[in-house]
Image (cartoon, grey):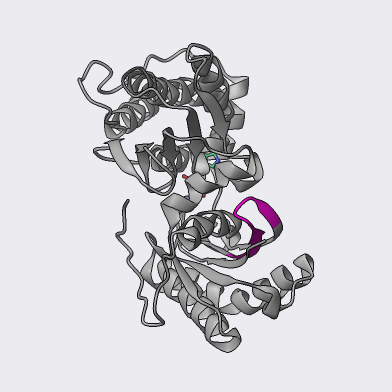
Amino acid sequence: MTKIISFESSADETSVAIVEDGNIVLSNSVATQINSHQRFGGIVPEVASRHHIEWITRVLNDALDTAHVEPKALDAVAVTYGPGLVGSLLVGLMGAKTFALAHGLPVIPVNHLAGHIAAANFNKPIKYPAMALMVSGGHTELVLMREENQFEVIGETRDDAAGESFDKVGRLLNLPYPAGKTIDEMAHRGQPTIKFPTAMAHEDNYDFSFSGLKSAVINYVHHANQKEETINQDDLATSFQNAVVDALIGRTKRALENFPVKSFVLAGGVAANSQLREELTMLLNDFPKTEFIPVPMQYTGDNAAMIGAAGYWNYKKNIFADLDLNTDPGLDF
Ligand code: KG4
Ligand code: ZN
């Protein structure tokens, strides 16, 4: 049994977890700062790093207490070193290194994006070759994994990330940040009365684009405001979400046709979207040799348990870092 303690602080969640063998979560303590950022309509980096400093020790103690694990029973310390906000990443990194030094444990560097994907192992073991649709506030990527812990980006967004487009439309409609969950709920109540464009549907690649859709929504709202027409916000949410999900499904279908895989993983904050989960379940019925593995709902958003899962992949490959490990805010696969 390998017990890894993991630290995540790349954006606005301070989190420490203890995970056994990459798939059993013994504890996952998460402190969210969303309330502090809501009035600004987005994450304020300076505010975020201050909160991480305030919370990290409490979250660490909580993770150890909940798991009933003594530091001497641990095998390694995993930590997110990128991508993310530099001031936020630094706090988790310092916490992890200090803990490792104090208890004589090795440090495992973890890519936040690999963490999101590894969280699928909390649902079912990923079988390889596998593909992942990684959709978050900062990333929208189709990732091919020919084997465990190897990532090949076959498609990505050329402009906004999927989650970012939810948040920008939310800001336009004066919804609280981040708006993905609220729009998801509104979309259930509305009707798809507005036809928005699904970008790049006919192009010969696996890339995405969401800025055209965002502009179409902005134009629609401005036009209605000028004519002093009231907007049915639920209908707008349904129509917008349909366009985002259509784009994600279309590209995924094409990728699955050209790369036969054993597992298909849905990961990242937007993986919580109910329509996306439903439509991917239906799509995967057409690919009976591919098992659909969405990340369990409670692990779709940022959390340290997922970093423990990806940390275990590195641990098995002897990928460790020295104590001079630095952050890499722009890290990709
Ligand atoms: O992975 P995540 O927690 O943080 C990043 O690494 O970016 O993703 C956050 C994103 C936000 O843009 C949020 O609006 C979106 O995930 N999100 C959703 C839903 N829940 C969260 N988007 C659509 N539908 C949801 N139910
Ligand atoms: Zn994330």
Residue at image position (46%, 63%) is 10
- Give the x, y percent position of residue 76: 56, 71
Front one among 154 and 280:
154
Residue at image position (43%, 75%) is 90
**Picture quadrant where residue 134 is located:** top left
Residue at image position (57%, 66%) is 6
- Residue range corresponding to the magenta coloring: 15-25
- Left-right relation of 164 to 156: right
- Give the x, y percent position of residue 302: 54, 54
- Give the x, y percent position of residue 332: 31, 53
**Picture quadrant where residue 109 is located:** bottom left
- Give the x, y percent position of residue 256: 38, 22
Q: Is residue 300 visible?
A: no
Q: Main secondary structure of the magenta part?
A: strand
Front one among 242 and 176:
242
Q: Is residue 289 visible?
A: yes
Q: Indicate yes or no whether the magenta region holds residue 23.
A: yes
Q: Is residue 75 above or below residue 117?
A: below
